[in-house]
Amino acid sequence: MSRTGRIIEPKDGSIFGFGEKIHFRAEAFDKTSEGNIDISNCIEWRKPCKMKGPVFSTTFNNREFAKVAIYVNGTNLATVKIKIICRVSKRLETYNSNESLMARVILAEAMSCNSSERIAIGYVVANRFRFFPKKFGSDLSTVIYKPGQFTSIKSDLFINLGSSEYIADKLTYKECQIYIETLMISRKILEDKNSDKDPLLIKTRQHGFFFNKASNSPPDLKRSPLILSKVKSGFMHSFYGYNPNA
């Protein structure tokens, strides 16, 4: 007598996104002189969890352990390794180039920050071309790439987020969730044409224009009145206003 088994689906090397439900199906047989005996109900699934029977479903939040094997009575019969990616394009509608660019600069500045701080930084970017285009630039791209405005554009993260392959293959589950959320944040900020929902405006009656990571006081109080300090806000950045007449 011999024993065989195979994983019918998914195929080895199949691609799925973080958190995407994956349906597994397998079969196993004992080959005897009298024919094949179906023993699929005896299949034990291992890695990432122990389940029994010919089918089961699961999700992955870690691409490093995306390998599943079937056993019968302790004997390994088949293994499949699948690829887990950050599949933004499948989970969300397509975002335009401005929304993606905004998300990249926000994350380059604040990947480790909470969503409130990322929103505040996004409005800092938008407020520059909305209210003082002669000073900062008249559109998003000009503001972001203008020398001396956002040094984070030289960071590896900003550069790498311009690559769909990097987003798919390198972002961790947590980073992927933050990236998706930040795309949504970017869209809402760009749709808010007058920055009426700028949280700094709502809280302080001032739009945010400057921010930095280095101090809790602006370098020039006359030119850059402080809106929120790191100490007061709990953010990793300090936020400032802008006085064009100073």
Image (cartoon, rainbow, N blue to C red):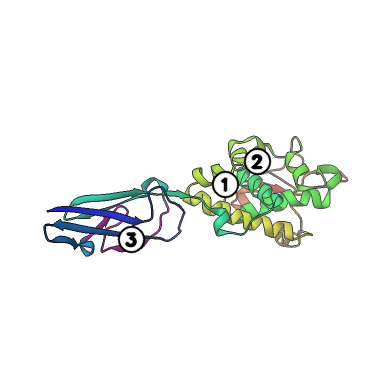
Q: Nearer the viewer, residue 148 or 223?
A: 148
Is residue 114 in view?
Answer: no
Q: Find numbered disc 2 in the image and state the secondary structure of the residue it sits on.
A: loop
Residue at 71%, 50% in the rendered image: 98
* Residue 162: image location, x then y, percent: 62, 42
Q: Which residue is mark 3?
A: 25
Residue 220 is left or right of residue 101, and the answer is right
Residue 185 is left or right of residue 31, and the answer is right
Of badges 3 and 2, the one in the foreground is 3
Q: Which mark is residue 111?
A: 1
First reached walking from the N terminus: tag 1 or tag 2: 1
Q: Which mark is residue 215?
A: 2
Residue 12 is left or right of residue 116, and the answer is left
Instruction: State the CA–CA distance, disc 3 to disc 1.
Output: 38 Å
First reached walking from the N terminus: tag 3 or tag 2: 3
Instruction: State the CA–CA distance, disc 3 to disc 2.
Output: 57 Å
